[in-house]
Structures are given as structure tokens and as C-alpha cells.
Image (cartoon, rainbow, N blue to C red):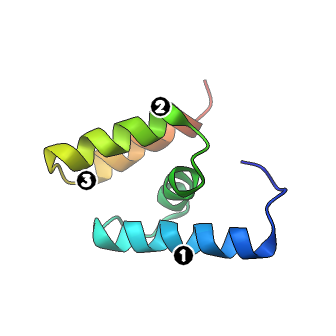
Amino acid sequence: MSSRLSRENAIAAAEKALSAMTRQNVPLSPENYFVWLGHALGVKEELDAEIRRILEKGSAFSEEVNADLFRRHFGKE
């Protein structure tokens, strides 16, 4: 993620990420926040598409789903 955000944009993205996490009952962990902040910022099209698919199916963001999102989109390869 870029460190070149303005303060206002960073705050807006953080609020958007936390709001989405709260709506989806995603536990507030550093890894989950990283995923949802990435989604709020739109840094990875594949991540955005995957989160949209999960939401469209009405699936829960279980511990396993959250861990998989982090590992596949931000973990070490």
C-alpha cells in the first residue's frame, strides 16, 4: 500500500475499512484490517473481486476466509 496518501484520504479509507469490517462482523485483527484497508483503497483488483463474490453469495467472513484472504493477497509467496 502506498504511503503517499493525504491525511484526509487515509482517515477516510480507515473509516471505510472499519465500517465494512463492522458490518460483516470481521474480527478486528491487524491482518483483517490490512485486508479491509486494502479493499477500501482498491489496491488489488483480485481482492476487491473476491470480496464482492463473497458478499454476493451471502457467505460469512469466517476466521478461515479472513486468513485465506490475507495469505493469498498479502502474505509471503
Q: Which residue does the image show at 56% across and 58% down from the upper left? A: 37
Q: Is residue 26 above or below residue 31?
A: below
Residue 57 pos. (x, y %): 15, 43
Do the CB atoms of the residues marked 2 and 1 lie less than 8 Å apart?
Answer: no
Residue 36 pos. (x, y %): 49, 57
Q: Which residue does the image show at 35% across and 74% down from the upper left? A: 22
Disc 1 marks a residue whose amino acid type is: Glu
Instruction: Give the secondary structure at mark 3.
Output: loop
**Which residue is outermost to the left?**
58
Q: Earlier in the sequence, mark 3 or mark 2?
A: 2
Q: Earlier in the sequence, mark 2 or mark 1?
A: 1
Disc 3 marks a residue whose amino acid type is: Ser
Q: Earlier in the sequence, mark 3 or mark 1?
A: 1
User: Where does label 3 land, which residue?
Assistant: 62
Residue 71 pos. (x, y %): 49, 37
**Which residue is outermost to the right?**
4
Nearer the observer, 69 or 8: 8
On residue 15, the disc is: 1
Image quarter where the C terminus lies is top right
Residue 40 pos. (x, y %): 53, 57
Q: Is residue 74 above or below residue 8?
A: above
Instruction: Give the secondary structure at mark 1.
Output: helix
Q: Which residue does the image show at 78% across and 49% down from the upper left? A: 2
Nearer the observer, 28 or 35: 35
Disc 2 marks a residue whose amino acid type is: Glu
Q: Is residue 64 above or below residue 23?
A: above
